[in-house]
Amino acid sequence: MDFLKQNSIFALVAQRLSFGLLTLFIISLLIFIGVEALPGDFAEAILGQSATAETVEAFRQELNLDQPPVQRYFSWLGGFVQGDLGTSLANGRPIADLLGWRFKNTIFLASIAALIAVPLAVIMGIAAALYRNTFFDKVLSMTSLSMISFPEFFMAYILIALFSVKLAWFPSIANINEQMSFAAKLNAVVLPALTLTLVVMAHMMRQTRAAIINILSSPFIEMANLKGLNRLRVVVLHAFPNALSPVINVIALNLAYLVVGVVIVEVVFVYPGLGQLLVDSVSKRDIPVVQASGLIFAATYILLNLIADILSIISNPRLRNPR
Amino acid sequence: MITLLSHLRTAPLSAKIGMGMVLITLIAAIFAPLIAPFGETEIAGDVWLFSSSTHFLGTDSLGRDMFSRLVYGARNTIAIAFLITFLSFVFGVTLGFVAATIGGWVDQLLSRMIDILMAFPTLIFALMVLSVVGTSIPALIIVIALLDSTRVFRLSRAVAMDIEVMEYVEAARLRGEKLWWIMRHEILPNAMPPLVAEFGLRFCFVFLFIAALSFLGLGIQPPAADWGGMVRENAGAITFGIFTPLWPAAAIAFLTVGVNLIVDWALHVASGLKD
Amino acid sequence: MKKLLEIKNIVIEGQTSDQWVPIVKGIDLTLKKGEVLGLIGESGAGKSTLGLASMAYTRPGCRIASGSIVFDGQELFDGSASLLRSIRGARIAYVAQSAAASFNPAHRLINQFAEGPVQHNLMNFSSAEEKAVTIYDQLLLPDPEHIGYRFPHQVSGGQLQRAMVAMAMSCQPDIIVFDEPTTALDVTTQIEVLAAIKDITRKYNTAAIYITHDLAVVAQLADRIMVLRDGQLVEENDAREILAAPKEEYTRELLSVRSFSTKGNKDKSGNKVILDIKDVTASYTGTEEVLSDINLQIRKGQTVALVGESGSGKSTLARVITGLLPQSKGSVLFKNKPLAPKLKPRSREELQRLQMIYQMPDTALNPRHTIRTIIGRPLQFYLKMNGRQREQRILELLEQIELPADYIDRYPAELSGGEKQRICIARALAAEPDLIICDEVTSALDQLVAEGILKLLLNLQQKLQVSYLFITHDLTTVKAIADEIVVMLNGRIIEQGPKKEILKPPHHEYTDLLLSSVPKMDPDWLDGLLEKRILAAAA
């Protein structure tokens, strides 16, 4: 008991970690059961009623449908952990080959967007909170409110119409391949990255502003002002350490949002990423690919939330210095 | 009713503009057959016509009148989004209140289950479920309503928890009131302001979500007019300098901006903040 | 002597939904070097607002509309930001009511102490550290060498409050504004903080503005007192003179609050026992006992006062009686029948006869219900009253609690604090109870309003023969209304018996500490008490 009290921060982190792992496990189970729970025979449902007996049988063997479900689940999960994701129904290629390159592309796109959006949004959010109710704040607030109301594809098409059709500065299709140089790749993803940045920034800025305003109304900030400290010191030394935890949460929440927002942007710009593959596979009902890419998305999302949780625990002064 | 109207009069300009925007969309949706010059799926002229006196916003990839489809699309999209939001509130608020007022292991169980569901990105979840059960309107409604109710659960539980610790709730418990009476008479009236604001927010989210699914070809299926789907159908044209797909996209933005403007004010009122 | 601070005809306004309304309506205030000025008044008097204005500071949503604030020859009204910064903290410092909220949780106490003098270029960090140890020592903080290296949440409430006084002293300011610094503390802790403040302001000859609602507290410190009401000055005079010979009626009322007491309590020891608590032990976690072996009897028409400081377990006992916290041992008999430990199995009749009134009338009334619903619900629920009969009864109850009949359609927000507490009383009475548990029912109210509530409760008791279990930390209230007194400490009953016996020496050691810590309307009380305690400790 005493040990736990002394190390409450470690206990909390350990608790979050185990909950993250548990969540991932349950999600994988859900994904698997979801397919199992299909009404009627899975093979027939996928192949349609016109399928001949032989094709159905071949399909069943392909997916090991003749084995009991529990065994199938663990061989699927075991394979997944070792990097064997099964084979695609649509073209019979190993899913790992299909996914690997696309996953890298998605991370590339999302990282660029995050690198621009996070610092900009946090700085603007803080500025808006500091200069609250000024003209600057009101303009920023109206703009961000509109931005979060726009569907991602609207933003994307506006950018295409402007920068690709009217001005012809950037390509409207973000086609990249492994032979391209880094600069060429960057040029190709300018528009999709910009779309993502704008959408995520609006959310992040609004939430950062709210978190900072909340801190600025604390009595200890009034006390700092009454000690005759200058404004910069009040904000940087008194408000910021306490705002860290909520702001980290905001950032992680939006990075997680970014992971999802990327799906639509990839479709608009025909970008060879994981999101586009997922959407394609859903329409083709290529279930093994859907399962694999869904699990990867979920894992990334859970990981980001986990990191945020842990960082915000560590940045909480009360937890860092227990009684 | 009178107090509500006088309340509306004190709303700031931005909220009034928002109300106007929502009202316009609603009128279009309700009176669609009277407003639209052409039928929902009627081929009215050549493909990709620019706007003219007959075709207010031009025609689409099949030569259907864009303006008419936009008006009918308002109907389909708004009705479904509203139904989903409503269902998700029925699930979410009921479970949230139950978790908060009963507490103990019931709360623990519900909250952990919801935590796990929320640890999964909604769009990905919806995509996967729809890939398995196929895209049909009822499936769409139930899947999104269930996923969205997790967010409503979180909020209504938190709000109910704040109210639950109030002494007037304890007084009702000590009086011997039943759980249902406490939820209905003590908690719900006080939870209304934040829940109303959240309803607007969730509606926007659901609306954008359906638009996104339709845009991906997995939502409301053609030939029914639907704003997200209409963007998808006409998307190819944009690279040729034809801006037809921007109209339905702008319509989506128009409604969500309107609702968000109102919600912003509602949240402000609900929080009781001065600035 | 030269005036250090001179505020003239100051008007401070607060923002309501669409206009500015005055909170402080043209008050003059002067302060000489080393002088302690007491600002006293009830809530809404504008005393905190006026106190903060001496630093030319207003809370968000307020503004100084007109007037002048001259400190040491400089005009602060409309003063530049850099002028105000150079004065705040360095020459006029502030001590807030809640030290827990006013210390930054992210920094160690010593860093927050040193920040002022270092930033105002008065000394470097290491000499500020030395100074901190000196002042911590002077304020009798335990382990002055090391306590500064703790974080605020690692220090107890009374110590933290003294640490804040130390922080205000760090620059040796000319004036310190104390804003209700002891209100949130227990009486025994309040004494320590009061003594610390008095000692250090004398030692450094610091002038002070001491803001409080409690005349007896301010009497110990102030040289001069200003009585405020609704943003206006009622009376201003030398402290001793105001206490001895108040000129205004309002000041007289404030002074007489503490002398109110029941005359000639009838002996109720022959009455029937309503509530009998036998050997009750309870705990929240199952391991640590918060109540141990409680034995207590309440008779018909009797008031039993349960006294103790925070954490003594007095409110926990109320939770056991009402069934919110089932006891682990012992039994509670209500009218000779054992009550089920849990709330659920109790009959509606049992619930009806046992009612409760809470500390905060704001949170005890549902803001979305009208007074009709609030009082009417128990009538409908227990007594099956409906329609005209119920309406009639609600009006009767309103009359009993001395509120006008047209309040029936109002919402709680349209009532004052005292009126809300009266509605809570009416709600309890509506059930026609035998016993009402009153949990700190007057501590959230202004003193004059509280007195009214106590008088009402006593009148009702005479009329209806209802019994009260009166839970309070305030000994003045106990003296005023109790028939019997029960003193609790750390979950145990220390002493219990009829009021006369308990209040008459010899006391139990802790009861003595409690009784002697209640400030008296006597400017020499604190000095005398401290002297006595020092002598006792030496002996």
Image (cartoon, helix red, strand yellow):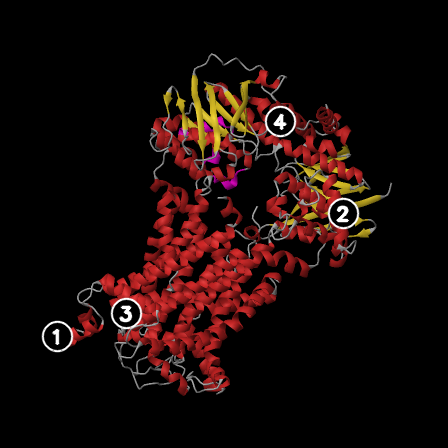
Residue that numbered label 4 is attached to: C514
Q: Quadrant of residue B256?
A: bottom left
Label 2 chain ID: C
- The percent position of residue A157, horizontal first and vertical second, equals 43, 79
Is residue C390 shown left or right of residue C11? left
Residue A213 seen in this snapshot = yes
Residue that numbered label 1 is attached to: A53
Mark 1 burial class by Cα count in 10 Å: few <14, some 14-19, many 20+: few
Mark 2 burial class by Cα count in 10 Å: few <14, some 14-19, many 20+: some
**Circle 3 sits in a helix, a strand or a loop, which is it?**
helix
**Are the numbered discs 4 and 1 placed on the same chain, yes or no?**
no
For the residues labelled 4 and 3, the Cα–Cα distance comes to 73 Å
Q: Quadrant of residue C255?
A: top right
Front in this rendered view, residue B233 or B147: B147
**Are the numbered discs 2 and 4 placed on the same chain, yes or no?**
yes
For the residues labelled 1 and 3, the Cα–Cα distance comes to 23 Å
Question: The N terminus of chain C appears in which quarter of the rendering?
Answer: top right
For the residues labelled 2 and 3, the Cα–Cα distance comes to 71 Å
**Circle 4 sits in a helix, a strand or a loop, which is it?**
helix
Q: Is residue A25 magenta?
A: no
Front in this rendered view, residue C126 or B100: C126
Q: Is residue B76 above or below residue C3?
A: below
* Secondary structure that dominates the magenta span: helix
- The percent position of residue C231, horizontal first and vertical second, equals 68, 41
Residue type at numbered disc 1 = Ala
Q: Which residues are magenta?
A: C392-415
Residue that numbered label 3 is attached to: B131
Residue type at numbered disc 2 = Lys
- The percent position of residue C490, horizontal first and vertical second, equals 54, 30
Label 1 chain ID: A
Label 3 chain ID: B
Q: Contact, CB < 8 Å: mark 2 with mark 3?
A: no
